[in-house]
Image: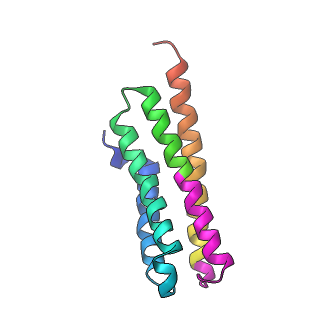
């Protein structure tokens, strides 16, 4: 199996692409401020899933990187809210669609993390 078959990675990849496209339409000053931050945090979410998957034989590392992915995902939604609240992002459909996907990924990461933690605690 590859990390590319994980539903959390598939959704994280989709979010990275959509965040990137959205950020290129922001006002110029935001492209290098909040736009840069939201691109970084969404990419960090996806990358943490990949790195954790690569370390999955070491359950504590797997758990640690899933926590990193979850926290970066939370950061991404915060940046999105900042863009919306400051009216730098004005396309409501884009905002609502991205927010729903990012929140869905957060729920999926939480569930996946719980599963990995339970597997780690069970005797083998």
Numbered disc total: 0
The residue positioned farthest toward the top in the image shown: 123
Residue drawn at point x = 43 percent, y = 64 percent: 16
Q: How is the image coloured?
A: rainbow
Magenta residues: mostly which secondary structure?
helix
Between 37 and 102, the one lying in front of the other is: 37
Q: Considering only vertical position in the picture, is 36 above or below 122? A: below
Between 120 and 26, the one lying in front of the other is: 26
Q: Is residue 28 left or right of residue 106?
A: left
Between 86 and 9, the one lying in front of the other is: 86
Q: Quadrant of the N terminus?
A: top left
Q: Considering only vertical position in the picture, is 33 above or below 56? A: below
Residue 41: image x %, image y %? 48, 59
Residue drawn at point x = 68 percent, y = 76 percent: 85
Residue 106: image x %, image y %? 58, 51
* Magenta segment includes 113: no
Residue drawn at point x = 45 percent, y = 13 percent: 124
* Magenta segment includes 82: yes
Task: Give the residues drawn in magenta, as a range.
Answer: 72-93
Residue 98: image x %, image y %? 56, 69
Q: Considering only vertical position in the picture, is 106 above or below 29? A: above
Residue drawn at point x = 64 percent, y = 72 percent: 82
Between 87 and 97, the one lying in front of the other is: 87
Q: Is residue 7 left or right of residue 107?
A: left
Q: Quadrant of residue 32?
A: bottom left
Residue 68: image x %, image y %? 50, 45
């Amino acid at each position: 199996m590859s990390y590319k078959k994980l539903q959390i990675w598939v959704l994280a990849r989709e979010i990275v692409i959509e965040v990137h496209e959205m950020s290129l339409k922001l006002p110029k000053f935001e492209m290098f401020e909040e736009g840069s931050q939201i691109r970084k945090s969404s990419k960090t979410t996806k990358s943490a899933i990949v790195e954790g998957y690569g370390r999955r034989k070491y359950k504590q590392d797997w758990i640690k990187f899933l926590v990193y992915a979850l926290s970066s995902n939370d950061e991404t939604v915060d940046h999105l809210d900042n863009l919306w609240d400051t009216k730098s992002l004005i396309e409501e459909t884009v905002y609502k669609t991205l927010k729903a996907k990012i929140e869905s990924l957060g729920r999926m990461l939480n569930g996946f993390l719980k599963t990995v933690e339970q597997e780690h605690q069970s005797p083998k």
